[in-house]
Image (cartoon, helix red, strand yellow):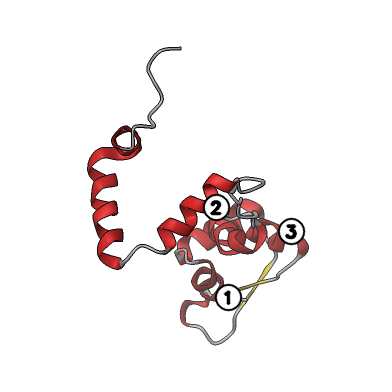
Amino acid sequence: MTTEELADFLGVAKQTVNRWVREQKWSTESLPGIKGGRARLIHLTKEVRTFIMKTPSMRHRLAPAVVTEPVPQYRAEKLTPGMLRIIDVLQNLTLHEQDRLNVLLAREGIHGFLTRLNIAQSEEK
């Protein structure tokens, strides 16, 4: 692979790849027919592949496939009769009623909503 091909693949500058070649002492050979004789082919040895896999661009490219976490389910173990009744009521609201409830919750919050229903927890403990 040429330095330009590797640079394009990794999304880095050719100069960066050339610096890696020097610093890591990668095995290369000259590419005939290129003006100036400075073009090089990089031998993709195990060390080169290992180095490339540790670069940030490769880590970010592989991250979605490697780090997949299960999405937690935030649900009660068992729905209580009260929760089932609340869900049933909410599902039977008209669109207008849903909009009004949404405005009320946005304005008052849960505490204000529960206070209006006269079921808010008292401040006393």
> Which amino acid type is shown beneath numbered disc 3?
Glu
Residue farthest toward the top in the current orientation of the protein: 125
* Label 3–label 2 contact, CB within 8 A: no
Give how far across and how far down residue 107 sits, in percent.
22, 42
Left or right for 27, reference 8:
right
- Above or below for 111 versus 44: above
Residue 87: which disc?
none
Give how far across and how far down residue 73 sits, in percent.
60, 51
- Above or below for 72 versus 64: above
Q: Quadrant of residue 28?
A: bottom right
Residue tagged 3: 47
Q: What is the spatial separation of the Cα atoms under label 3 and label 2, in whole angstroms?
A: 60 Å
2 or 1: tag closer to the N-terminus: 1
3 or 2: tag closer to the N-terminus: 3
Residue tagged 1: 2
Give how far across and how far down residue 100 sits, in percent.
24, 55
